[in-house]
């Protein structure tokens, strides 16, 4: 009875999300911004459906969680969360159309941050808080998905982290997910509290601090200001957000290990080293280019370069400078960052550094094999041995990523959208980044795109966030056979 | 004494190429176009160096041809051919700079067709004939490389064709290469003669017929007219060239089989089916889009769509319409064709259909494996079993292709070239296509690019043509160790 488990899980998700609506509700009452009614209505509808579902499916608790159930629940659960997320937008009349509500919600839960809002600052505060909260909840979902669920499903090479996640290692999937989740969520919560306080130190009010913290730690990118972080024009706030974006782009199991004083294994982690090295290199190159062409001062060039490279490579998407007027090299570096993305096991999107590292190692090994056809070779990742199924999973992921990118870009160009906008919009949505180039650049938004493009990009955001495999597998007929 | 074999091979290549200079020389004398002197000088220099080298290295004939020797000879030989090819351009003063001479020659021998000539029609006929001849010679080289050398070196998945090429199967590489080459070159010659006659039927003179035949069968794309094939504005000539471009984009071992009446195995060849299906599909989509937006008539839309899709997917690069003013979908389709390319074992470039098919099959198999983790699965390509080393070679190739594309695009954008031009120029050069988009589009050329960009693109053309592996391997330190 797979369906019952799915329904029960969706019910549980609905109740959890419904309860979190109390936070935006509180702000909406405090500011008396007119969004109290739609938020209360949304909460009643969500809990009104979720609670009975939970009650009537009680006997299906602790289901035997096999691969198929898990994959179905992840995809259906994420879609359900998205639809729930769209409800307050719809009832508050924030957007003209249902499509826009879903787009904004999927952009929130997938921690993408692409927006169809043309004037953010005139939207009621309660709704803006809800919008940022979808990021934060999505971020929680991603951490669990990438560190507790995907390694066990053996999808996209994430099985590399099978023995990595903290907590005990029981045979059943469900208790393991709970243990991993609670351990990692504590770190997520601590980061959240620290960042809110640090932002308030910089003069941001509580509301904006919470929203921007949600957007940062989930590597989302929704802001409460039309100018995004550029609004504050503060080196301190830029620095705080840059640091926390980078923290959010690091594997959360490393944060967990650090919490328990395991400093050495953390800094010998190959992915962390690669990630920090790439970030440092790209920031330096960008800063140099900007100093030569765009900004008069070296420190100014470095500040904007550091923020923007960190924002795009961690797939957050916050903006402090209009990088569309930057030189073409900086633009192509940022476009490359959209594909590369952050670390596996972080809240960031993109292909993930771990996968690119494995692909590069594969090439070197392949060249070595051509020179020494009879040598016995073995791919290693730090101290871990990379088995054939891991590298196969990574290859499959890479090819599907590129395939989805091409297919979606074709759809967008077919709608008459120019090449730079089409390609960068798709890259930004599959990679869960947010802003692209061209007419979806840092000073623009996604509002003007045709309806079909918005749905296509919504699919990209969902597939990108769920590591493609999880969704695509549901469309393989073989999956549904007994 | 590996070096002696390399020197002897270069000597042999020099003598062969030197002798072929008689053809442009004949036309130059006939037209009395002023290029007789530089052509005679070039011939004397090339033969003057090549013949003594051949004589003094006689005792190294029939060398024991191991993997290392073969790969070194291929790369060094191709570079030598390019430098020889640049000599007539240099001596005739066709181009201002040495860089431009090398660019045009590498574009010729790699059958790319990217040109730095701004006014083709004012160049002496002898030089134009030489320019087209470099295509034809490059095409000969490619056929042998892809069907006789690469399968045995086990590079980039070409080992799939190990048992495929015609002729006997001895242990030694050298006699095999000779047998395969002579068999396939007969087909190449027959195609050449037939096409020259067909073009002359369409009213083209002998000179232009020969040049355009060379450009077509090698999937090169150098024309003798500034407007390329659009100059003739003839449906008959368009049709002839379209058909021969497609023939040149098909694996030449299939043509060989067809010659011996083996019709069934040819039409059950999975790559041929895939290639023709993709071509037909993309032509229909493009024709439909063009009919809706650009041209008034259906037959006109079909004619331009068929020509341009065939031209780009076979990586020829001839032009009958300015596809930069076509709708964005058509442009992105053509950009996609630049990457896909034609069949393996053809004179076409790009990634090759065979590789993309294997990657797609891999994804399906990977999804199947996730659903049935314990099932024993095996990748098949037609009736052939795809071994692990083949698929590893294909993956490695794919990743290196994308890596080279990104790296080169960065270099071009760093020189201040816009994104569309940079990305499409690199795609067109690695894929050995010719025209790109933006400022290197169908009505433009590569003359205005900075010197560094021209050298970068020259490297791309060479690497793309030699299937990346063959060149890259020479830069692995391991390769040079005993």
Image (cartoon, coloured by chain):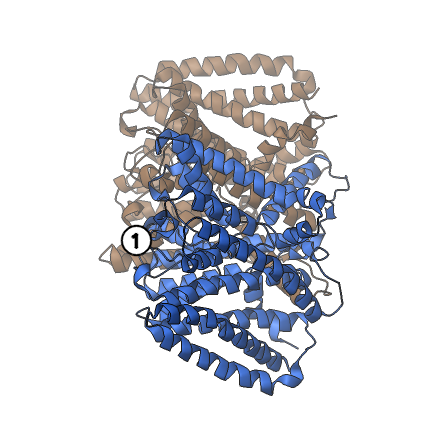
Chain colours: A blue, B brown
Q: Residues within 10 Å of mark 1 (few under 14, many from 20)?
A: many
Viewer-side residue, B48 vs A225? A225
Q: Chain of mark 1?
A: B
Q: Quadrant of the C terminus of chain B?
A: top right
Residue A207, image x, y percentages: 42, 60
Residue B61, relative to residue A30: is it above or below? Answer: above
Residue B163, image x, y percentages: 67, 46
Residue B342 can be seen in this image:
no
Q: Quadrant of the N terminus of chain B?
A: top right
Residue B222, relative to residue A187: is it above or below? Answer: above
Q: Residue at x 67, y 63 (%)?
A: A180
Residue A272 can be seen in this image:
yes
Residue B184, image x, y percentages: 55, 39
Viewer-side residue, A271 vs B256? A271
Asked whether, in this view, residue A453 is left or right of residue A148, the answer is: left
Asked whether, in this view, residue B163 is left or right of residue B84, the answer is: right
Q: Residue at x 46, y 24 (%)?
A: B20
Viewer-side residue, A77 vs B465? A77
Residue with the mark numbered 1: B327
Viewer-side residue, B230 vs A174? A174
């Amino acid at each position: 009875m797979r369906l019952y488990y799915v329904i029960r899980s969706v019910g549980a998700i609905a109740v959890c999300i419904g309860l979190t609506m109390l936070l935006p509700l509180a702000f909406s009452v405090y500011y008396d911004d007119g969004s109290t009614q739609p938020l209360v209505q949304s909460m009643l509808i969500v809990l009104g459906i979720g609670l009975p579902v939970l009650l009537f499916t009680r006997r299906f608790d602790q289901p035997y969680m096999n691969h198929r159930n898990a994959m179905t629940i992840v995809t259906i659960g994420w879609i359900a969360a998205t639809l729930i997320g769209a409800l307050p937008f719809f009832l508050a009349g924030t957007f003209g159309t249902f499509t826009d509500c879903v787009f904004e919600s999927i952009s929130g839960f997938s921690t993408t941050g692409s927006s169809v809002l043309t004037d953010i600052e005139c939207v009621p505060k309660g709704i803006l808080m809800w919008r940022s909260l979808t990021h934060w909840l999505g971020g929680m979902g991603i951490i669990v998905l990438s560190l507790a669920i995907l390694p066990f499903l053996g999808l996209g090479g994430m099985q590399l982290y099978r023995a990595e996640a903290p907590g005990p290692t029981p045979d059943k999937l469900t208790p393991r997910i709970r243990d991993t989740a609670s351990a990692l969520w504590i770190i997520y919560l601590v980061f959240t509290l620290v960042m809110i306080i640090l932002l308030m130190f910089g003069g941001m009010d509580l509301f904006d601090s919470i929203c921007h913290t949600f957007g940062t730690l989930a590597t989302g990118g929704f802001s409460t200001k039309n100018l995004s972080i550029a609004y504050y024009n503060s080196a301190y706030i830029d620095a705080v957000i840059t640091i926390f974006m980078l923290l959010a782009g690091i594997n959360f199991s490393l944060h967990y290990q650090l919490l328990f004083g395991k400093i050495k294994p953390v800094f010998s982690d190959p992915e962390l080293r690669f990630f920090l090295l790439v970030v440092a290199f790209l920031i330096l190159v960008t800063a140099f280019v900007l100093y030569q062409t765009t900004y008069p001062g070296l420190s100014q060039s470095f500040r904007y370069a550091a923020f923007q490279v960190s924002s795009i490579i961690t797939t957050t998407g916050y903006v402090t400078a209009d990088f569309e007027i930057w030189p073409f090299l900086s633009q192509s570096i940022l476009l490359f960052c959209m594909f590369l993305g952050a670390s596996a096991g972080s809240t960031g999107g993109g292909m993930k550094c771990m996968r690119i590292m494995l692909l590069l190692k594969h090439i070197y090994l392949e060249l070595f094999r051509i020179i020494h056809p009879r040598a016995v070779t073995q791919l290693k990742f730090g101290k871990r041995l990379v088995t054939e199924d891991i590298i196969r999973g990574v290859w499959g992921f890479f090819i599907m990523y590129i395939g989805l990118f091409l297919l979606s870009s074709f759809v967008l160009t077919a709608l008459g959208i120019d090449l730079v906008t089409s390609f960068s919009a798709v890259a930004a949505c599959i990679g869960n980044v947010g802003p692209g180039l061209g007419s979806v650049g840092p000073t623009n938004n996604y509002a003007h795109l045709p309806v079909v493009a918005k749905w296509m990009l919504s699919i990209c955001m969902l597939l990108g966030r769920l590591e493609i495999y999880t969704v695509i597998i549901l469309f393989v007929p073989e999956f549904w056979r007994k």
